Image (cartoon, grey):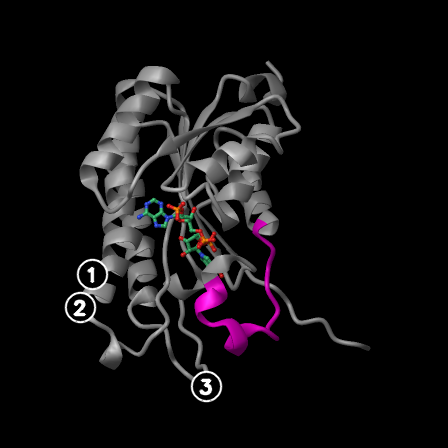
Amino acid sequence: MSSAEKNLQKVALVTGASAGIGAQIALQLANNGITVIGMARRTELIENLNKEVTGLGKIHARHCDLSSEESITAAFQYVNETFPPLTILVCNAGMLKANFISESTGKDIKDLFDLNVVATSICLREGLKLMRTNKSKGHIIVMNSILGHRIPEVPVPLFSVYPATKHALTALCQTVRQEIHFLKLNIKLTSISPGMVDTDFLSVYSRAVAELPKLQASDVAKAVMYALETPDYVQVEEIILQAMRRFDI
Ligand SMILES: NC(=O)c1ccc[n+]([C@@H]2O[C@H](COP(=O)([O-])OP(=O)(O)OC[C@H]3O[C@@H](n4cnc5c(N)ncnc54)[C@H](OP(=O)(O)O)[C@@H]3O)[C@@H](O)[C@H]2O)c1
């Protein structure tokens, strides 16, 4: 079977598919023939995204508020009942609140960990359960960040706990990979760690980052496609990518 034919049988769930990087990932997956279920609160944006698909796949919208465990488990149950079996899970949704830790509220700190770490962990659990039950050849993508690996010196350090949440994802990916191996599952796990990407996400910094080089969301989606298209025996564990300064020489 050609890889194009195999893609027609694949089902991908993408969290945070209504905007930015998740929307581009959903589009590129569907343009490659994959059936995509995009999850977010703004489902109307995902429905509109489906109109942009030029390939053989389709993007279905499913409402999910990742701050609620019930909402997450209901969404995974819906995917399993409506489009089985799940073969690709993209844990992409995340948030940033620019602030000093010394000035952050407890709610802001908790919201960041709840979405970036707790919701991602619950999605990983639900995805692993489905792939394990269905004995799927699966692939899980976790949207990490370069700040999940190293923290640059910047003039005004308004990172708050965001890098701590992304460092948690780095640990989580390594732990889950060990668990997958222990349980003898045919599931790959790839962590994608971009530097700055030109999406609404950075609007919290607006002027401070305006002049800095940035990736496009489609560049990150292409990195995801690269990891997904490797042969069965190749696992891309980590991709770190960032925009490069261009010099006149
Ligand atoms: N942009 C960057 O510079 C950059 C760099 C490195 C890593 N990243 C990572 O890349 C990922 C995507 O970032 P982005 O730039 O594409 O951000 P974005 O444009 O702000 O999009 C965030 C997405 O997450 C969803 N989301 C947020 N809270 C949610 C909730 N409670 N329930 C369900 N969905 C929720 C949003 O959907 P709704 O609002 O419709 O629910 C939206 O689709 C994040 O994990 C981020 O940490 C971004």
> What segment carries the magenta color?
202-217
Which residue corresponds to mark 1? 110
Q: Residues within 10 Å of mark 1 (few under 14, many from 20)?
A: few
Is residue 184 among the parts visible in the rendering? no
Q: Residue at x 44, y 81 (%)?
A: 153
Q: Position of residue 23 (x, y in %)?
A: 51, 42
Mark 3 / mark 1, whichever is N-terminal: 1
Q: Are marks 2 and 1 in contact (CB under 8 Å)?
A: yes
Outermost residue toward the right in this view: 249
Which residue corresponds to mark 2? 106
Which residue corresponds to mark 3? 155
Question: Which quarter of the rendering shows the N terminus?
Answer: top right
Q: Residues within 10 Å of mark 2 (few under 14, many from 20)?
A: few
Q: Nearer the viewer, residue 232 or 35?
A: 35
Q: Residues within 10 Å of mark 3 (few under 14, many from 20)?
A: few
Q: Quadrant of residue 27?
A: top right
**Which amino acid does the dot numbered 3 rest on?**
Pro
Q: Secondary structure at mark 1?
A: helix
**Which amino acid does the dot numbered 2 rest on?**
Gly
Mark in front: 2 vs 3: 2
